[in-house]
Amino acid sequence: MKHQLSIIALLLFVTFPGSDLSAQEGSSRIGLGDYGQTSILDNRFNPALSFIGDFVATWSDDEGIEAGADGFKLRGAEIGLFGAVDDAYEFHGILFFDEEEVELEEAYVLATDWLTPTTHIKAGRFNMDFGKLSPIHDGELPTLDKPSVLQEYIGGTLRGTGAEVHWWSPIGDASLLRGSLGIFQSAESDSHVILGPGGGHHGHGEEEDEDEEGPLRETGDFAINARLSSLFDISDTATVQLGGSLLTAPERVFGVDEDDIQNVDKSVMGLDITLVSTNESNGSGYRFQAEALINDQDSGELDEGDPAVEGDEIFNITNQEATGFYFMAERTVDSNNTIGLSYNQYEHAEDSDEESSDFGVYYTKKLNEFNRLRFEIRSFKDLALEEDGVEELVDFTAVSVQWTVQLGSHGHGLEW
């Protein structure tokens, strides 16, 4: 037995020569070798971990397009990894799991002290800085889903692979000015919607997911986003933020077959205002938030009336400009109980003559710092495709219960 223990001890010594906790050559960090390999069997080099599970139960009186949302559903489970690469860089990675697939939602490096102390650079794949609620993950929303107008115009969340520069500067003693500018290979939509146009209304949602990405863009055809916002105090307990966002995504091409090609020049502009008041002694307060958006896009379709036409002239270009808005109001009774209401009204992106709206009330109960319950009732006025193929305006109401569990380190800083 002693002979066997001696062999094991020798193997451990050979396998882990740095077990004396000394710094390896070329590294100032104890136990750290090349490319992050360690010689210490503990967790001091592991990133911070987080886990968010989001469970939803929904019942509605709709017999058509939203019928698939009824019942119990695991909207998703999110695993996050966060860690400092060195004093000037951080790495963030977020994996999303639902009942059918695994998705890499975000993986990016954040340079926190490269240019100036008030300038950050993000590079990788991540949610674009557009508006107030678009960058926020679904499990952290104040309501069950992203506002319907965001689902309609940008798909809920804008995500892409590229880079953004963020900067901010104080204005006096009680206000801040903050801006961002980004460039991406493409502007992709992503949202795990339970109710709303992103879940299947008027030709959106799963049908668009079947389209395949077309040819790569030329140098001048990348998606560009920008945001400018100002945050200032209006009293000892109240803060106001004003913001504006812009997205341009020229020459979006879907499909690889000739019959499926569609050219779209798209731009979205948003203006938002947020008023927050908090009593730090008991956690009570209120919040008002509103955002208005303008969606402008050129759509091109094959002109089957003249089969002799070839090349770019085969497209019949049409322009659609649509507007919409949402507002939300919340009353925080204390640090654990919040009641609120929301309203959306928007013209359809593909046909501005068609309009939809929804109104909801909700109650959020924080059971403790790790999990919460939310009860929400929403009434919709939207178009439904009838059996004869004609779209008609229908009313329906949905009742939802949401249970969200959060473990570990997780946070996104200030809501800019």
Image: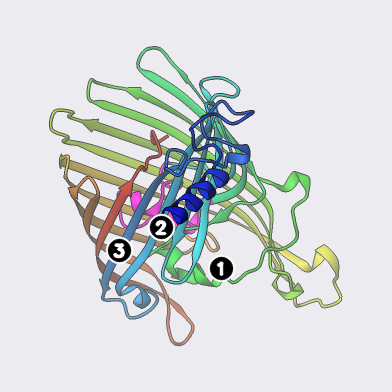
The residue carrying mark 2 is: 1
Residue 135 location, x and y as percent? 46, 46
Looking at the rendered image, the disc whose residue lies closer to the viewer, 2 or 3, is 2
Q: Nearer the viewer, mark 3 or mark 1?
A: 3
Mark 3 / mark 1, whichever is N-terminal: 3
Between the C-alphas of marks 1 and 2, the distance is 62 Å
Q: Is residue 265 above or below residue 211?
A: above
Circle 3 is placed at which residue position? Answer: 55
The image shows residue 335, relative to residue 257, as above or below, that is: above
Q: How many marks?
A: 3
Residue at disc 2, secondary structure: loop
Whether residue 229 is in magenta: the answer is no
Give amino acid for label 3. Answer: Phe
Real-space CA distance between mark 2 and mark 3, rounded to the nearest whole angstrom: 53 Å
Which residue is found at the position 35% from the left and 54% from the top?
52
Q: Which mark is residue 353?
A: none
The quadrant of the rendering that contains the N terminus is bottom left
Percent across and percent down for residue 25 are 63, 29
* Residue 364 drawn at (x, y percent): 20, 51
Discs 2, 3 touching: Cβ within 8 Å: no
Which amino acid type corresponds to the residue marked 1 in the rendered image? Asp
Q: Amino acid at mark 2?
A: Met
Residue 49 appears in the rendering: yes
Name above or below for residue 257 compared with residue 167: below
At mark 3, the secondary structure is: strand
Q: Which residue in the protein does label 1 denote?
A: 209
Would residue 274 appear left or right of 170 to someone viewing this image? Answer: left
Q: Which residues are magenta?
A: 132-158
N-term mark: 2 or 3: 2
**Is residue 410 rendered to the left or right of residue 108?**
left
Q: Quadrant of residue 281?
A: top left
Q: Nearer the viewer, residue 380 or 347?
A: 380
